Amino acid sequence: MNVTVENLGPCKKLLRVEVEPEKVEEVFLEISAGFQREARLPGFRPGKAPKDMVAKRYEKEIQDEVKQKLINEGFRKAVKDHEFTVVGRPDVEDIQFERGQAMQFAVTTEIAPQFELPEYKGLTVLRDNTRVTPEDIERALRLLADQRTEYKTVARELKTGDVAVIHYNGTCEGKPITDMAPTARGLTEKKNFWVTVDATSFIPGFGEQLAGMKAGDKRTITVDFPADFVVPQLTGKKGVYEVELAEAKEKVAPTIDEAFAKALGAENVDKLREGVRADLQNELNTKQSRTIRQQVAQTLLDKIQIDLPESLIEQETRSLVYSIVHDNTQRGTPKEVIDAQKDQIYASASAGAQQRVKAALVFQRVAEKEGVRVEQMDLLRRLQDLATQYKVTPDKLYKDMQKAGRIEEIAQQILSEKVIDLLVQFARIEDAPAAAKA
């Protein structure tokens, strides 16, 4: 067999394969013999029909099977001889095939990039040893109190920090907002809508204009939709809202006292503070561990410059789009909102795809060198965790992910995590200087 290789790009090759006539004839005889054994022709017992009759009756089928076998074997041998790792789906063309002659065909295929691993043991990373402060504890206690805030209806005028319960109708350029942005029904009209009286709630600049209103008051509010507004059709435009205040509510946060502590399951305020401190420290430890893992992975990736196969980037982009849409759907995001953001979703997925493909290729190389593997039990545990997270049965999740072609993606995630575990074990971890902790 003769193979010539042409470079079509950093990761794309054109393999021109020629199979000698003797090999073509050998495979013809092998395939024909198989048909001879299985053929069922009228008047003959299975396997007893004359060879010539079988060859004539199944001529096309035999030729197709011979051709496919030769292409598969020739391509595999060419890839093995040149030590290529194929990615994506090969494209076979220019097939010249006739019995008694050499067979020729060409295959366009993408291959994994060839690169040398740098030293990945002893990578230096910085550890942030920030500890929980009394101020952190008090801030967390205030947040806990805020979560148990009650909203008391008041007869006075609204002031900053209050909550307004309003009815509103919105227009833009004199027309209902849905004329300009059909999916933005919630921005056009709402009844009994709760909004905090401040500068950032709802639409920037909207809430603060409610200050001074009393229940029953009506007011026209004008806003400027910001350049990064979630509804792209409205960016940079003005909105006009006719607002009626249904209720004014005052936030009443509980006092942090013994009763508050007991309501949260603590014996007293001191015990509550101890529990909060422990929870905050656990969060810090988790953040520090995550940061170390990110650092060690990025440090290795930054040492390697490689060209990436386009098909893998496209595949990873599709996978990320699926993940983003699936996660938004699970959170209850309406389909029309997701559809309105499809361009942003694709752009976000495309931006992350190259880094993820590079990481997968590098981590796969480290895994091969260190003997790291993903066992079946690893995959089953991960699917169980994901099923619990998404509130579906493991069987349904498996079928959905299999249908979407994401099982291999999950296995790759597990492999990457195992490799990063190994890199952290090998790493030289140093405490960050005080100036770097800010």
Image (cartoon, rainbow, N blue to C red):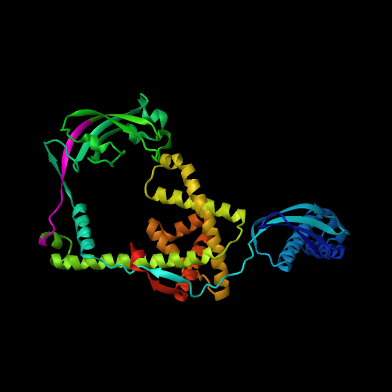
Q: Camera-side residue: 122 or 394?
A: 122
Q: Nearer the viewer, residue 288 or 167?
A: 288
Describe residue 12's horizontal placement relative to residue 407 as left or right.
right
Q: Quadrant of the N terminus?
A: bottom right
**Quadrant (top left, top right, bottom left, bottom right) of the C terminus:** bottom left
- Main SS, magenta region, reads strand
User: Where is residue 165 shown, x and y percent of the image?
Assistant: 21, 37
**In this picture, is 184 found above or below 378?**
above
54 vs 271: above or below: above
Which residue is drawn at the image coordinates 45% and 48% (left, top)?
Answer: 325
Residues shaded magenta: 244-258
Q: Residue furthest top?
A: 174
Is residue 96 something one can see in this rendering?
yes
Q: Quadrant of residue 59?
A: bottom right
The spot of residue 105 in percent (x, y) is: 78, 56
Total numbered circles: 0
Residue drawn 38% across and 68% down? Answer: 289
Q: Is residue 248 magenta?
A: yes
Asked whether residue 139 is drawn in magenta, I would say no
Given residues 2 and 407, the one toward you in this image is 2
**Left or right of residue 297, residue 196 in this image:** left
